[in-house]
Each structure stands twice: as structure tokens, then as C-alpha cells.
């Protein structure tokens, strides 16, 4: 099968998200200039550089009570900071609660019953029990083709690692089983690892 996205695919559901998988989930926490808190998952998320460490995530839809974007991106525009909370399998249900189209005044930490802690390097809350948290300062926002397609890039200025995930000096993902996004309504968890040695190493 071949199709041009501009012409449509003719399938019951768009297969694009099922092709580019698995995708890590950036559970982004932000705070508005008015002090309001927001927590929402984004599956268009990844690390993009080592030195300095940098990440990105994309917001691809809009809420009626925000100006052409969603709560997360709106808060970042106001404050210039955000925190990426890594999602473990055990938190799949509460993460899903935070994905709802809640009004801007809803605090997703409270709605989902998630414990929060204050970040160290930025004025923002983080998921207290997450396996890891990446405190970020916005470096740039890029507007992509299409309606409300925005990408935020951030420099990681602080990193929290949960103690039980450190094994012999290695951040061991099998200890918490990262949750990943697939297509449609599907998710997966990482339970097994294997290593490959690069040629020339």
C-alpha cells in the first residue's frame, strides 16, 4: 500500500502514529504566570542533544480557552520553563487522567491525585515519585506547517533520578518499565534490554 497523506489513506484510522513507534512520553509539568499548575503527556517528545543536554516536545492541537495552543505551551510562553517527568508503567492510569481536555483552571496534579514536589533549578512543580525529572529552560519555540503545530526546545538544567532506579551506577529502566506510546489507543512498556557494540568500539 502507498498513499499520499494529502490524499488520505482510506483506512478506518490514521496509521501514521502506529508507524513511528514506540515513542517516549514526555509528561510535561508547567506553571502559569498566575501560579496555576498543569500536567499533561506528550508523545511527540525526545532528547535531541548531549552537551548541553536538550529535549523537545510538540504540541499539535488547540483548546478553546487558550490562544491557538494548549495549556502547556501557553504556560511555557509565560514563564520560559517546563519539567519533563518520565512515565513508568505503574503510573499509566494517573497519566491517562491528565491527558483529558480539562479547563485551564483544573490542576491535573490534584485531579489525578499525584504527589508533587518543587523543582530545584526552575520555578515549577514536578511529579514527586517519577523515575526521573528533567528541569528545562526554554531555548526556542518553532512553529511547524499546519494548524497549531508548535515545538518547544529546552535545555535541561536539572535532573532528578529516583534512588531505586540506580543500580551499580546505571539508571536501570527495567526497575520502572518506561511507558511508551504506540498508534491508536495502544501503549507498551519496556521490560527487556539487550546491548549491541558499535563497530570500532
Image (cartoon, helix red, strand yellow):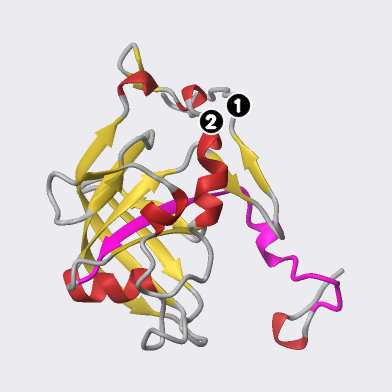
Question: Badge 1 is on which residue?
Answer: 191
Front residue of 115 and 16: 115
Q: Please determine whether, in this image, residue 133 is positioned above or below residue 16.
A: above
Image x and y of residue 171, in percent: 37, 25
Within 10 angstroms of label 2, few (less than 14), some, or many (20 or more) residues? some
Image x and y of residue 51, in percent: 22, 46
43 is within the stretch colored magenta: no
Q: Which residue is painted at 55% across and 36% down in the image?
A: 89
Whether residue 78 sits left or right of residue 168 in the image: it is left
**View extreme (top): residue:** 168
Asked whether the residues under the numbered discs 2 and 1 touch, taking CB atoms below 8 Å apart as contact, a structural biologist would say: yes
Q: Which residue is painted at 18% across and 73% down in the image?
A: 34
User: Split into 4 quadrants, where in the image is the N terminus?
Assistant: bottom right
Q: Please determine whether, in this image, residue 126 is positioned above or below residue 193.
A: below
Front residue of 85 and 111: 111
Within 10 angstroms of label 1, few (less than 14), some, or many (20 or more) residues? few
Q: Please determine whether, in this image, residue 104 is positioned above or below residue 113.
A: below
As helix, strand or loop, the secondary structure at mark 2 comes to: loop
Front residue of 166 and 50: 166
Image x and y of residue 10, in percent: 86, 78
Quadrant assignment, res 160: top left
Question: Looking at the image, is mark 2 or mark 1 earlier in the sequence?
Answer: 2
Whether residue 37 sits left or right of residue 103 in the image: it is left
Which stretch is magenta? 9-32
Label 2 – label 1 distance at C-alpha: 6 Å
Image x and y of residue 23, in percent: 56, 51
Q: Which residue is painted at 34% across and 37% down in the image?
A: 132
Quadrant assignment, res 158: top left
User: Split into 4 quadrants, where in the image is the C terminus?
Assistant: top left
Question: Badge 2 is on which residue?
Answer: 177
As helix, strand or loop, the secondary structure at mark 1 comes to: loop
Instruction: Identify the mark at residue 164; answer none if there is no mark.
Output: none
Amino acid at each position: 500500500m502507498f498513499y499520499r497523506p494529502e490524499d488520505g489513506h482510506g483506512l478506518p484510522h490514521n496509521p501514521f502514529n502506529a508507524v513511528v513507534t514506540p515513542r517516549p512520553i514526555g509528561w510535561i509539568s508547567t506553571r502559569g504566570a498566575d501560579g496555576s499548575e498543569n500536567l499533561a503527556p506528550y508523545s511527540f517528545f525526545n532528547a535531541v542533544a548531549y552537551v548541553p543536554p536538550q529535549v523537545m516536545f510538540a504540541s499539535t492541537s488547540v483548546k478553546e480557552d487558550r490562544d491557538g495552543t494548549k495549556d502547556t505551551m501557553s504556560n511555557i510562553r509565560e514563564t520560559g520553563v517546563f519539567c519533563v517527568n518520565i512515565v513508568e508503567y505503574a503510573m499509566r492510569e494517573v497519566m491517562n487522567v491528565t491527558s483529558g481536555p480539562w479547563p485551564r483552571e483544573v490542576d491535573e496534579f490534584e485531579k489525578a491525585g499525584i504527589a508533587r514536589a518543587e523543582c530545584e533549578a526552575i520555578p515549577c512543580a514536578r511529579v514527586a515519585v517519577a523515575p526521573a525529572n528533567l528541569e528545562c529552560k526554554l531555548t526556542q519555540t518553532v512553529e511547524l506547517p499546519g494548524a497549531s503545530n508548535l515545538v518547544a526546545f529546552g535545555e535541561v538544567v536539572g535532573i532528578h533520578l529516583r534512588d531505586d532506579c540506580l543500580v551499580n551506577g546505571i539508571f536501570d529502566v527495567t526497575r520502572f518499565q518506561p511507558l511508551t506510546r504506540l498508534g491508536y489507543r495502544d501503549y507498551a512498556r519496556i521490560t527487556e534490554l539487550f546491548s549491541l557494540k558499535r563497530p570500532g568500539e
